[in-house]
Image (spheres, rainbow, N blue to C red):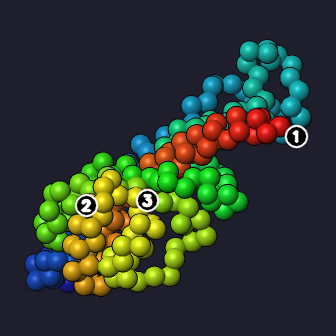
Amino acid sequence: MNTSSQIRLLLWKNWTLRKRQKKRFLVEIFWPVLLFVGLVWLRKANPLYQQHECEQPCPQLGSYIQQGESLQAWCPTTTAQLARFYVDIQELLLNQTDIQNYGRLWRELTSFSDFMDVLRRNPSALAGRGLRIEDMLKDDELLTAYLLRDVGLPESLLYQLLNAKLRLEQFAFGVPDLQLKDIACSQALLERFIIFPSRMGLHGVRNAMCALSQQRLQRIEDVLYANLDFFKIFKLVKFLSTTHVQLSAPIQSKWL
């Protein structure tokens, strides 16, 4: 058998094999294409450095200017490397939204930590000045719809609950170890943790929540935590802390 016949036979065998194994045939065609597209995307995502056309000094001769060279045509290697490093640092640190968010979160956490220190030292200083529940929720919160649709809470009681204030001094040393069912069915415990707009709202919320099971109350708590906006809470806490300092300053100066 001559060479041409062997080549035709080899091509015929490969073509027959590919027709029988179509998936393998498609993979063998598309994987080089995908590899090429990936390389093109990487090149566009990470463009090459734009370096000025200048003459680099020879390493064996040092970094001084050679004979026949001018100051305009001489670019030290160290300067070019420092420029590249400076550009990379700017791209990584100054133009990243995540880094800015981390800085914002750190500032808010610092303010919150200072506020908690003040609250632990003097809990009575902020007694009766809680945070309104509605002000702590996200802009696209789902707690209201859940209480109306799934729990079946009337709109009047929902208004009383969302406009109630949470007593921060009760959480100065952590979350109390109490069952939600016990809190919901006790008027004293509700008044201990929450400031309601009216007595009628207190009794209405207590009666509605006490009729729910422990599992349903736990689900309400989970939905509440999922819809809290902690940046809003940090801002409100910072505002309360600033107001406390402004109010306590005249009192201290008076006693001094």
Frontmost residue, 132 versus 125: 125
Q: What is the CA distance from the residue labelled 2 to the residue labelled 3?
A: 18 Å
Which mark is nearer the camera, 1 or 2?
Answer: 2
Is 25 displayed left or right of 39 in the figure? Answer: left
Q: Earlier in the sequence, mark 3 or mark 1?
A: 1
- The answer to whether 90 is drawn above or below residue 187 in the figure is above
Local secondary structure at mark 2? helix
Q: Residue at x 41, y 73 (%)?
A: 188
Q: Which residue is mark 3?
A: 166
Q: Position of residue 255 (x, y in %)?
A: 79, 39
Q: Residue at x 75, y 40 (%)?
A: 252
- The answer to whether 17 is drawn above or below residue 247 in the figure is below
Please tell me how crowded label 3 is: few (under 14), some (14-19), or many (20+) other residues with Cα within 10 Å: many
Amino acid type, callout 2: Met
Q: Residue at x 89, y 35 (%)?
A: 61
Q: Which residue is mark 2?
A: 200
Amino acid type, callout 1: Gln
Q: Which residue is mark 1?
A: 60
- The answer to whether 39 is drawn above or below residue 92 in the figure is below
Q: Say the numbered circle drawn on residue 164.
A: none
